[in-house]
Amino acid sequence: MELKQPIISLEGIHYCYPGSRPILKDLEFNIFKGDRIGLVAPNGSGKTTLFHIIMGLLKPSSGKVNIFGKDRRTEQDFIDVRRRIGLLFQDADDQLFSPTVLEDVSFGPLNLGKSKEEAVAISIKTLEFLGLDDFEDRITYKLSGGEKRLVSLATILAMEPEILLLDEPGNALDSAMKSKLIDVLNSLNITYVLISHEFDFFSETTDQIFSMENGKILLDDEVYLHIHQHSHKVGKQPHEH
Ligand SMILES: Nc1ncnc2c1ncn2[C@@H]1O[C@H](COP(=O)(O)OP(=O)(O)O)[C@@H](O)[C@H]1O
Ligand SMILES: [Mg+2]
């Protein structure tokens, strides 16, 4: 019987920003096709750093990054990774750079070699899927925080990624937008890892929860369902109701 191989495998990853303390220390993390993973840890734990290592935006000082069955080291190696994995940045202003929404969302498909007409059609369809009908001509910098967040997600989904890395996707979303995001994630049938601090959000969108401590990933094996006024998954992390 063939053993299931992870589609992302990180082994012995160390990372330290220049002049700072070590952030990731001998970190191990395997992600399998179909995983819907939640990642929760206090601010400064290295969650965003971890996503940036997977995308090749930061290079680990040591350790092995294997994605889609290939070791990834050079800038060239990560071109393929960035086409196939969509990263939603923690800050939407890092994601959006074009004057209009349509230009931002069609940028990815155009880069993948689609014609202008195809890219526009994909963009409009993706915006509609996210409940952003008629957003094409909106001026990006004038959008609300929540709208920027969903347009950022549109820029990624328009590239039809195989994996999503979502860095605090619920930030700045009002409750209607959050419900939309939950519906979208549940309808996608895609592998993803999402960072959040909200356990209610995890319980609706993820199957496993991991945490980070001392630069390592921990499986939050105390995840369980409990019942009080409502029921949801809860991990080791303190949380409020
Ligand atoms: N560019 C940087 N230069 C130096 N330190 C950084 C930089 N980016 C992040 N850090 C530090 O690295 C640590 C981990 O950051 P980050 O990965 O953003 O954590 P998280 O996403 O879990 O809040 C924090 O202490 C943060 O201040
Ligand atoms: Mg972060």
Image (tube, rainbow, N blue to C red):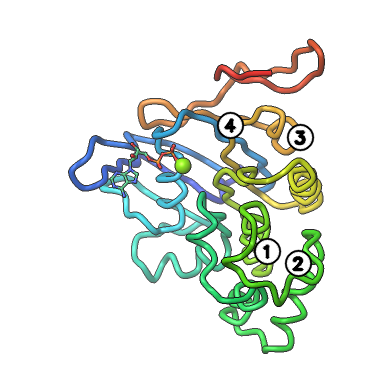
In the picture, which quadrant includes the C terminus?
top right
In space, the residues marked 3 and 4 are separated at their CA atoms by 13 Å
Who's the residue at 59% across and 79% down the image? 112
Above or below 219: residue 108: below
Q: Nearer the viewer, residue 228 or 33?
A: 228
Q: Name the residue under label 2.
A: 127
**Which of the marked residues, 3 or 4, is nearer the chain's N terminus?**
4
Q: Kindly indicate the quadrant of the structure image that contains residue 49.
A: top left
Q: In this view, does 221 lie to the left or right of 206?
A: left
> Pointer 2: residues within 10 angstroms few (<14), some, or many (20+)?
many
Q: Is residue 1 left or right of residue 26?
A: right
Q: What element carries label 1?
A: helix
The disc at residue 204 is 3
> Pointer 1: residues within 10 angstroms few (<14), some, or many (20+)?
many
Q: Kindly indicate the quadrant of the structure image that contains residue 213.
A: top left
Q: Mark 4 points at which residue?
A: 197
**Which of the marked residues, 3 or 1, is nearer the chain's N terminus?**
1
Assess mark 2: CB under 8 A from ligand 2? no
